[in-house]
Amino acid sequence: MKIIKVAIADDEALFRKGMKLILDSHSNLEVILEAENGKDLLDQLSQIQDFPDVLLLDLKMPEMNGIEVAKVLQKDYPTIKTIVLSTHFSRAFIINMIELSAVAYLPKNSLPSEVVETIDAVFKNGFYYNSEVLAIIRENIISKKKPKAQFSLDLTAREKEVLQLICEQYTATEIAERLFISPRTVDGHRNNLLLKLDCKNVAGLVVFALQHEIVNIPLRY
Amino acid sequence: MAIGILIMLAFALAFVLFVNYSQKKILNEQMQVQKLALEHQAALLHSNILTQEAERKRIARDLHDEIGSKLNVIFLNIHRLKELTIGNDEINPITSEIESVINTTIDSTRLISHELLPPTLEEFGLIETIRELQHSYNKLGKIQIEFTSMENENSIQNKLIELNLFRVIQELVNNSVKHGKCTEIDIKIWAETEAIKLTYADNGSGFDSTKIETYKGLGMKNIQSRLQMIDAQYQYQSSSGKGMQITIELQHSEAI
């Protein structure tokens, strides 16, 4: 079993401590970094070779807040998958953080089991947007009424199928099973999608697909 | 004799002129005093509003930083306790109860703090905050808010203008819902580099706009002071049964 390396950035020391104890009690999770604000996080990241896979990021922190640090992370550490864990669970914050490559967004008082599930899902699928967050992404598209993409999207039927299933949060293996192809072929399609749509990660694909109405995600309320 | 009469007349004329002059002077002074009193009153109101806003901000921040974050710590630890006591029929119901109470308290702390000062306003500005207000009302389904915005990027830089316009909109929506019993509200905002224009209309019961006094009680006083404070011009129209409209305009250069 691969161990998922986790970093926590939160200004409340006791919260970090409690969260670390809970996460470390899961055999596949290990908290390797704790930071008290954005600046501290960047300082520590600059001193290590072995980067965390997943970051639990608080937004309101002194010195450098979560929004500011996400801008740097997006550019300098694109492999770290950011899960926002914040009291600010409202439209503008969620949209903004997703645009800054956050791959999941949870309210601060989520059950620890939800946090663990999200970390697993993010590690496996690259992102995890729950129905509330998906609804907000969709509302945002409607309220902005962006013109539909004019450029030719040149996607093959198979690629569209794969994109649709990625958006429905299936793993590569599950997609392979459903489409009767090998997981490696699925990876190939996914890489093509990333290249063609110019996205950095799977979360980017999902947001792009939703924004340009390429796929249709059934919302569960 | 004639000279005597002339002198008398001259005195009388001088007296009349003097009285007239001094009356004018007194009147002028009275007006000056009144004007100063009014200005003083306005200044007092404005400083009241500013103090109130500063207090709100402080309480919102303290609620979030001092209480909210500690509640989150308690929540996590209750959860750990729960994990450790699985199967203990005496302790489990207690931890579950504490967990649920803390969760509700976290939610209400957040709500109270957001109501005092929406964090979105500080971070993302007026337009996004109105949009969140719109979505939160539309979600409840009792009224439908339409919101259109036309803006240049970063066109409203002044935090005080944003805060006051937002409070005015909050108050207007409250009035529309509480007193106007409306079902639809339409908000439009044009934010240009030089000027901001905002229109607000509802389809509620309205009020007789010739009898402004009836509306004064409905938070209109607060709205007026806030608009005065940011040097905004406004006009409203309403008649019984026909909803109300208000147009607010302000020039950036005039702004504080």
Image (spheres, coloured by chain):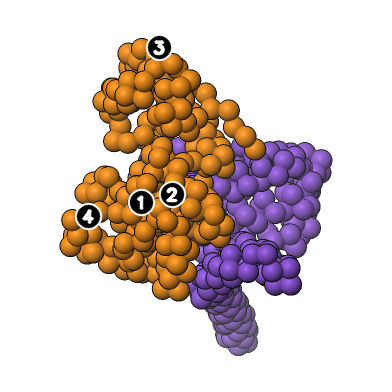
Chain colours: A orange, B purple
Q: Are marks 2 and 1 on the same chain?
A: yes
Q: CA distance from mark 1 to mark 4?
A: 12 Å
Q: Chain of mark 3?
A: A
Q: Nearer the viewer, residue A139 or A5?
A: A5
Q: Which residue is mark 2?
A: A119
Q: Could you tell me the amino acid type at mark 1?
A: Ile
Q: Residue at x 41, y 43 (%)?
A: A122
Residues under numbered marks 1 and 3 in contact, where contact means CB atoms less than 8 Å apart: no
Q: Are marks 3 and 2 on the same chain?
A: yes
Residues under numbered marks 2 and 1 in contact, where contact means CB atoms less than 8 Å apart: yes
Q: Quadrant of residue A157?
A: top left
Position of A164 relative to A114 (above/below) = above
Q: CA distance from mark 4 to mark 2?
A: 18 Å
Labelled disc at residue A50 = 4
Q: Is residue A31 visible?
A: yes
Q: Position of residue B148 (x, y in %)?
A: 53, 36
How many numbered marks are there?
4
